[in-house]
Amino acid sequence: MALPALMAAPALAAGDGKAGASSGAQAKPADPEQGRRKVLDELFERLAKAQDAVEARGVSGAIERVWMHSGSDTADLLMNRAMQALQRKDYPLCLELLGAIVEIEPTWAEGWNKRATVRYLAGDAMGAMQDIAHVLALEPRHFTALSGMGYILQGRGFDARALEAFRKALEINPRHEDIRRLVDKLTLEVEGQGI
C-alpha cells in the first residue's frame, strides 16, 4: 500500500538529525500524491475554462482517468475486476471487490464512488448516499458523485436538494449539458418562473 510508505518518510526526516542532514544532500523523492493533486488542480482549472462541451468532455474524461488510479497495484487490480463484474451485472461480486478496495485504500475517493454507483444499481440508495458522503469528504470536486447524489435525491422526490447537488456539479463542470438541462428544469419546478 502506498499510504504507509508515504507516512514513513516524514518520520525518518524527523529522527536524530543525522537522517535530516544527509537527506538534504540527496534529492528528495517525489510524493506521488502531491503530483496527482497538482495534475488534478490543473485539470480542474482547464475544466472551469473549457470553451465548449467537447473540450469539457475531454478534460472531464482526463480527470476521471486520474481518479481511477489509486497508487496501489492491488487496489487497481481489484478495481479492474470489479469493473468487469459490473459489466456482467454481477453486483454481489462487484460489491465484494469494492468493499475490499475501500478497506485497503480508504482514502481513494474513486473506490467509494464506484461502490456508491453499484450500491445504487443494486437497489441500495441509502448505502449509495453513505458512500457518496465519503467521496465528497475526500474529493469535494467529484462532479460525478455530486451528480449521482442529485439523481438519487430527485428519484426520492427531494427536488430542492437535488437541484442543490446538480448546481454544485455544474459549478465544477460548467459545460456538462445534461446537468445544465436538469438544473434548468428543476429550477423552474422548484423555484418557479421569475416575474
Image: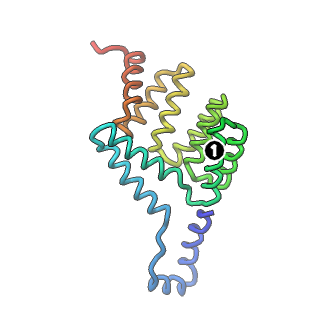
Left or right: residue 138 compared with residue 97: left
Residue beneath the point at 60% across and 40% down: 131
- Identified at 55% across, 48% down, the residue is 109
Residue 129 drawn at (x, y percent):
59, 34
Report the residue at 61% width, 44% height from top: 83
Q: What x and y, as percent, mark residue 51?
A: 27, 41
Indicate the colouring scheme: rainbow
In the image, farthest residue toward the front: 88
- Residue 61 drawn above or below residue 123: below
Q: Quadrant of the N terminus?
A: bottom right
Question: What count of labels does the image hold?
Answer: 1
Element class at badge 1: helix
> Toward the viewer: 50 or 145?
50
* Outermost residue, top side: 195
Asked whether 22 or 39 is in front, the reply is 39
In percent of the image, x 56 and y 40: which residue is there? 133
Q: Quadrant of the C terminus?
A: top left
The residue nearer to you, when weighing 62 against 70, is 62
The three-letter code of the residue at mark 1 reads Gln
Query: Is residue 47 rendered to the left or right of residue 155?
Result: left
List the residue tagged with mark 1.
Answer: 84
Other residues around mark 1 within 10 Å, as few (<14) / some (14–19) / many (≥20): some
List x then y, in percent, for residue 164.
44, 29
- Pinpoint residue 92: horizontal percent, then vertical percent: 72, 38
Quarter of the image where one finds residue 178: top left
77, above or below 149, in the image = below
